Amino acid sequence: MNTNIARHDTASISKIDYHRKNQHFSGVVWLTGLSGSGKSTIAKLINQKLYDQGVQTYVLDEDDVRHGLNNDLGYGERDRQENIRRVGEAVKLLVDSGTIVMAAFTSPFRSDRNQIRHKFRENEFLEVFVSCPIEDCEKRDPKGLYKKVRIGEIPSFTGFDSPYEPPHEGDLVVHTDQESEESSSERIFHLLRQKQWI
């Protein structure tokens, strides 16, 4: 850690102040699962539902972050870990501003997701496993990634030659091979109500 950097106290307006102003809690819904499982679609559906109710929200999506904040990172194990670490820091800032964040990231390593969880207070981090068999994800293949994997253009692809570790103790599992993404988003929306975020 650089000893020449001082942390500034931004508490003149606290997170609780933002909660009072916004009339809702803030936290992150962390959507994890294989590529093509429906994470981004579900994140956008929840975001729309919350926005329609006047909730301060933001979607952080893997592709968007990879084009900007993390465009210097590759897909090796260390770069994937750094990608998730940076995302965790960005999410923390947004949550501190009173925002409910939908974070849609493959985030294949359980240890990385747990490190992010530990940045937050209890009840500020909800881990949702978007479960879908890799065969179904490959049939969908919305970005054409699985096709590239099959012809050897993408090495170390999660679910093939790089592992995906599902949550041991996530807050919710949605099965997008068995239910629509709309139904999955409704279940997550209900969880937010149960947790009294909204």
Image (spheres, grey):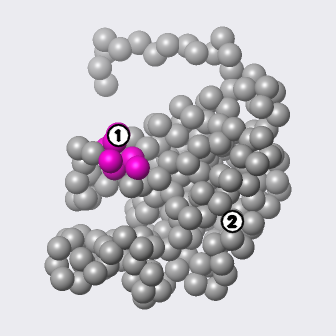
Task: Give the image location of residue 109, x and y in percent.
Answer: 40, 62
Task: Give the image location of residue 159, x and y in percent.
Answer: 36, 77
Task: Give the image location of residue 52, x and y in percent.
Answer: 76, 48
Q: Amino acid at mark 1?
A: Leu
Closest to the observer, 50 or 90: 50
What secondary structure is found at the residue carrying circle 1?
loop
Query: Where, by quadrant of the figure, is residue 54 drawn?
Result: top right
Q: Is residue 67 visible?
A: yes
Q: Mark 2 sits on what residue?
A: 185
Task: Give the image location of residue 121, x and y in percent.
Answer: 64, 39
Q: Is residue 66 magenta?
A: yes
Magenta span covers which residues?
64-70
Query: Where, by quadrant of the figure, is residue 71 drawn?
Result: top left
Q: Give the vertical position of 5 relative to 107 (above or below).
A: above
Q: Is residue 177 magenta?
A: no
Q: Mark 1 sits on what residue?
A: 69
Identity of the residue drawn at 39% across and 47% down? 65
Q: Residue furthest left?
A: 152
Closest to the observer, 94 or 109: 94
Question: Of marks 1 and 2, which one's residue comes earlier in the chain?
Answer: 1
Instruction: Rate crowding at label 2 as few (under 14), some (14 to 19) or many (20 or more) other CA atoms within 10 Å.
Output: many
Q: Amino acid at mark 2?
A: Ser
Number of disc labels:
2
Q: Left or right? Give the position of 82 relative to 90.
A: left
Identity of the residue drawn at 65% across and 60% down? 45
Q: Left or right? Give the position of 192 relative to 168.
A: right
Identity of the residue drawn at 17% across and 73% down? 153
Are circles 1 and 2 on residues that touch, CB within 8 Å? Answer: no
Q: Left or right? Give the position of 16 relative to 85.
A: right
Q: Is residue 162 visible?
A: no
